[in-house]
Amino acid sequence: MTIEVDTSVVRGGGEASGELATDVNRALEYFDSNIDTSQTWVAGAMMDWLLAEHSSFAASVESGLLRSKALMVATQGALDDVAQLFDDTEYDAQVEVRNLFGDLDPEAATVPIDASTDRQTLAFDSPVDALVAPESSLADPGFEVVWNILNWPDYLSLSYWGRQIINGVIQLVRPDLTGGQDLFEFLAQQITGDWHKVALAGDAFGHVGEFFEELAAALQNLAVDIFGAWTSGQGADRAGEYFAELVAAFAAQPEVYSDLQTKYSNAAWAAFGACQAMLSAVDALVDAAIATAMGVSSVAEAIAALFTLGGMAPAAIVSAVIAAAEAFSAAWGVMMTATSAAIAAGATIGSATTTIEFVPLPEA
């Protein structure tokens, strides 16, 4: 049987496969730029525990990207060979053409992609367009403002203001010591880890997942175009099954990267919550020590004493107002400390119980 093939379309498919291989290579560069495989950026005992498998995760991601690139390069080579064989009028060389495309999943009877297969809707002009700069989920300016408002009792803490003064002096004299970061957050991060960098890594994993989603869709559309010009023969059937299995393997990857994004985002929130809880606890202990040294029961009482000694208002009124403020402030402070601890505990559980199951990619 003579098989007619529009080799220009097949050859164009080979070129497009090569472009997708280049896109995968750019995804690998994106991964290298945004996720430190050495784990030095997650320094901190807490983060070392939360992300104990980071090196293993990173190695699996890198391996998957390299294998994906190899698959696309192999696909380009096979399509170029198909076009050449048919250009040479070797219409009866169906065995040679069929053998260009191995069965990627021998255990599955996969329905081949052909000209009637539905085309996919693409969100981007190119899969690589999904690889945008990652953002930290904890870096939203609006979140920082709201958090500072919720923590208003800090402004009644002598320890809090002491920390601000010390931090201000450090930033004025030795800003390089902490890279411009709040001194006490910097010190806390030596225990908890740098939550912003971890959050950035989580977002980067999410974008790599979007890349694979687009890669699968683009490859399916590419295959539909090819089999619109190569419609019959055992070679076309084998190639259609090859493309179907490759598309399925790529399409399964986003779920893995979503798991990674969740795990790293949870770890970042855990570190943030733990840091806030630690600072609140330190402030409470220091304030209690100050109050004891002054011979009063609380810092608020000490402030009230200063007001009354200064004759700025009748002692009874000032004491009543301060007592009410103290009671409300204490309750609110306890709630916010508990909130910080809950963020840390909840995120820690979520991070520690997330299992990452990497979907195996076939050999090229």
Image (cartoon, grey):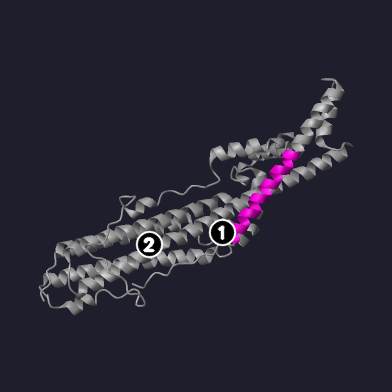
Q: Amino acid at mark 1?
A: Thr
- Report the disc number at residue 40: 1
Q: Which residues are magenta?
A: 331-352
Residue 35 in the image: above or below residue 277:
below
Q: Residue furthest bottom?
A: 95
Q: Is residue 187 visible?
A: no
Does the residue at mark 2 contact the one at mark 1 (Cβ under 8 Å)?
A: no
> Which structural element holds mark 1?
helix
> Which structural element holds mark 2?
helix
Characterize the local packing of mark 2: few (<14), some (14-19) or many (20 or more) Cα atoms within 10 angstroms: some
Q: Nearer the viewer, residue 335 or 201?
A: 335
Q: Amino acid at mark 2?
A: Ala
Residue 338 highlighted magenta (yes or no)? yes
Residue 244 in the image: above or below residue 135:
below
Q: Position of residue 188 (x, y in %)?
A: 67, 50
Q: Is residue 244 left or right of residue 318?
A: left
Residue indicated by mark 2? 251
